[in-house]
Image (tube, rainbow, N blue to C red):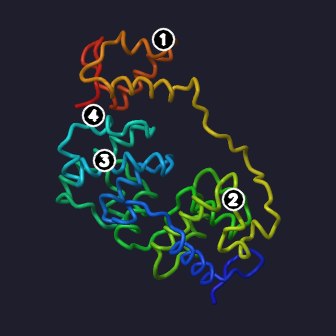
């Protein structure tokens, strides 16, 4: 039996077996798992970035009903994608998804490409998303390193509470070392689910973990993170909040919005104008005139 670990043997095959068996029993019933075709998987992955499943579900379902194929979305104005994105946050993801749909339609015959190298060339698709779609939709063998997977691996294998802020070369080597030869896509989904519902960032439920006895972090007594302090992102009073309020007015409007209406959403004129300028620069807002604004067409 292969093993992995710093100063003790960790049976990798047993780790795989337990985590995947747990997933088979406990996995949440999610629409992109029920229907793991490439397009639903791609849409879900972009929506789920930095956004909880509970917020994504209704938007995802409405999105897929309205735009069941990349060509359907590509034929719509990009502003419709921004409006349909609603309050998921980070609305540039809506533009990226629209741009990816256009590229898929124009360069791939309307079918989401199946290889990592093709996927990563799509607008708005980075390493994680390319690996996730190639794995979950096409059964590819890739290390899928989202925040949840990274936390599970660093705790179980390295004995540390949290991974580094960004993926390191050493972390990627470790993930590839533990990647099963077959069933890698199931392992990726299972470790992702384990991190999302059991091995959570702040309140891990070690009593419910299928590999608690194999976990180095638990064996060491759950040592506290000794790196830079990990702080949650603030919201109140930030540019993100102002941008969100401006976009909400534009989403809810039946047509172009006059500047005075936008001025009413935030008292700080300097911050408001800075945020409006940034929305224009990001392609999320079209300035029709100096005093009239709309979502992109």
CA–CA distance between discs 4 and 2? 40 Å
Q: Nearer the viewer, mark 3 or mark 1?
A: 3
Query: Which residue is at a point 74% across and 50% down the rendered structure image?
Result: 227
CA–CA distance between discs 3 and 1? 35 Å
In contact (CB < 8 Å): disc 3 and disc 4: no
In contact (CB < 8 Å): disc 3 and disc 1: no
- Describe the element under mark 1 as helix, strand or loop: helix
Q: Nearer the viewer, mark 4 or mark 2?
A: 2
In contact (CB < 8 Å): disc 3 and disc 2: no
Numbered mark located on residue 63 in the image: 3
Question: Dot 2: within a 10 Å radius of its alpha carbon, few (fewer than 14), some, or many (20 or more) residues?
Answer: some
CA–CA distance between discs 2 and 1? 43 Å
The N terminus: image quadrant = bottom right
Numbered mark located on residue 204 in the image: 2
Residue highlighted by disc 1? 269
Could you tell which of marks 3 and 4 lies nearer the N-terminus? 3
User: Number of marks in the image?
Assistant: 4
Question: Dot 1: within a 10 Å radius of its alpha carbon, few (fewer than 14), some, or many (20 or more) residues?
Answer: few
CA–CA distance between discs 3 and 4? 14 Å
Is 219 situated left or right of 165 in this image? right
Where residue 104 appears, as percent x and y from the top left, is: 23, 55
């Amino acid at each position: 039996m292969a093993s992995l670990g710093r100063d003790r043997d960790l049976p990798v095959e047993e780790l795989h077996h337990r985590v995947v068996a747990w997933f088979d029993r406990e996995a949440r019933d999610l629409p992109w798992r029920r229907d793991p075709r490439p397009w639903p998987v791609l849409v879900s992955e972009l929506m789920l970035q930095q956004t909880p499943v509970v917020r994504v579900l209704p938007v995802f379902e409405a999105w897929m009903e309205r735009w069941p194929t990349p060509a359907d979305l590509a034929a719509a104005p990009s502003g419709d994608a921004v409006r349909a994105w609603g309050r998921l946050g980070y609305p540039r993801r809506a533009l990226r998804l629209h741009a990816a749909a256009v590229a898929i339609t124009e360069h791939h015959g309307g079918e989401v490409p199946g290889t990592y190298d093709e996927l990563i060339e799509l607008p708005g698709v980075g390493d994680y998303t390319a690996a996730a779609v190639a794995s979950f939709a096409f059964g590819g063998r890739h290390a899928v390193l989202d925040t949840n997977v990274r936390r599970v691996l660093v705790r179980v294998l390295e004995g540390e509470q949290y991974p580094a802020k960004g993926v390191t070369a050493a972390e990627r080597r470790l993930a590839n070392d533990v990647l099963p030869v077959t069933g890698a896509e199931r392992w990726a989904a299972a470790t992702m689910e384990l991190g999302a519902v059991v091995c959570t960032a702040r309140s891990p439920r070690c009593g419910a973990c299928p590999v608690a006895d194999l976990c180095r972090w638990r064996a060491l007594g759950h040592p506290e993170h000794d790196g830079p302090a990990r702080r949650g992102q603030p919201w109140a009073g930030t540019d993100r909040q102002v941008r969100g309020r401006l976009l909400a007015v534009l989403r809810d409007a039946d047509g172009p919005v006059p500047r005075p209406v936008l001025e009413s959403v935030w008292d700080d004129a300097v911050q408001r104008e800075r945020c409006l300028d940034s929305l224009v620069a990001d392609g999320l807002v079209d300035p029709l005139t100096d005093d009239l604004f709309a979502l992109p067409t």
